[in-house]
Amino acid sequence: MTESKQQHIFETWLDEHKALVFKVVRAYAFSAMDQDDLFQEITIQIWHSIPTFREESAVTTWLYRIALNTAIKWVKKVRKHPLSETLDNVQNVLQDSHLQIDERLSWLYEEISRLDEIDRSITLLLLDNFSYKEMAGILGISESNVGVKINRIKKYLISKSKKYDHHGI
Amino acid sequence: MITMEFEEMKKIWDSQNNEPMYGINEKALHNRILSKKRQAFHITNISELLSIIMYSGGACFILVMNLFRGSSGIFMYILSAWMLCSALYLLLSRVRRINGDHRFHRSMHGDLAHAISMATYQVRISYLMRWNMIPIGLLTVLGVWDGRKSLWIAAGILVFFILTYYAAGWEHGIYKSKKRDLEILQDKLEKEEVEI
């Protein structure tokens, strides 16, 4: 694959699926500096993955696989060696867009962040309508295991929503 | 007590697909580029100077030792000349690189292009210097063999050069990955500009 073709694919993917990357970043990294670092890490892994993409799966499935695997590894790495604030990182490249964000969405992210890394991945995939088979393929676990985990996650989120102040919604 | 059904959570989740939740801070991106540029400049500068000193110092040392001992072995003289040529090549490359520095604009794009150009230079030099180990290693081993030294010494030197060759490959990989990171940053920057 030529470099210009790789670059073209990279730009197209990032343009069409940046929301997917942002979701993973927000679910796995919580400070602005961490979000920046994880975003950078995921985009690098996406770039490297392009020559090995065989179109046997949808692009979103492929990107989720890369983004989630990178995020899970990143969490383990950061747990061992937390990022230190350097001059380079004082200002973050990735910034919250000043859009009015539905506070129920913030609540949802907060609850997702309380789950372990694998359950977090399953929740993201479930919310984005992936099938059990696709989730099993992405995460490398059995479909039955995915099913068990989904039931538990749904129960957990619904029970947490009882405690959430809906502000009359 | 109100509960939220999972389908409702899905609707809330889908709402973020239309509006990106983050934007890119151009100033911070520029600062990051400047920092990477400084880092690339520092690494290139130090490794260039060290290599020039090492090659020229080594060449002079071998030449003086051979002249002092009155050695007639040809390989050590060739080695000395080869190392001197390597030092000269590095020196000329350095001068060319420094002269070319002013081609870049003081803008985000210019700084990034400069950093990439420096990283490309570093990748090329590390690649050439890695392959340069082979003639140097061979000439050293031949010189030792020619000087009727123990076979073990020659074998030890050969092992040393093989290890150095692999270490140089690892170093080359680091430079390549740094260059790749910069190019990804450039892609992101270009994409941002298209969107703006």
Image (cartoon, coloured by chain):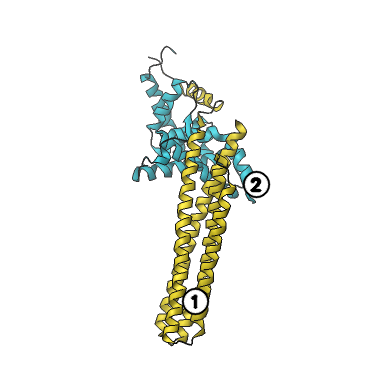
Amino acid of disc 2: Lys
Is residue A82 left or right of B58 when viewed as pictured?
left
Give the residue number, with chain letter if any, for mark 1: B80
Q: Could one spot residue B25 in this view of the protein?
A: yes
Residue B147 placed where, x, y %?
A: 44, 86
Residue A5 is labelled as 2
The chain in cyan: A
Amino acid of disc 1: Ser
Compared with B148, A21 (above or below) is above
Q: Nearer the viewer, residue B58 or A59?
A: B58
Q: Residue at x 54, y 71 (%)?
A: B85
Q: Nearer the viewer, residue A106 or B100?
A: B100
Q: Secondary structure at mark 2?
A: helix
Compared with A64, B142 (above or below) is below
Q: Nearer the viewer, residue A41 or B34?
A: B34
Residue A50 placed where, x, y %?
A: 58, 47
Residue A96 placed where, x, y %?
A: 47, 28
Query: Residue A34 occupies which quadrant of the picture?
Result: top left
Q: Could one spot residue A139 in this view of the protein?
A: no
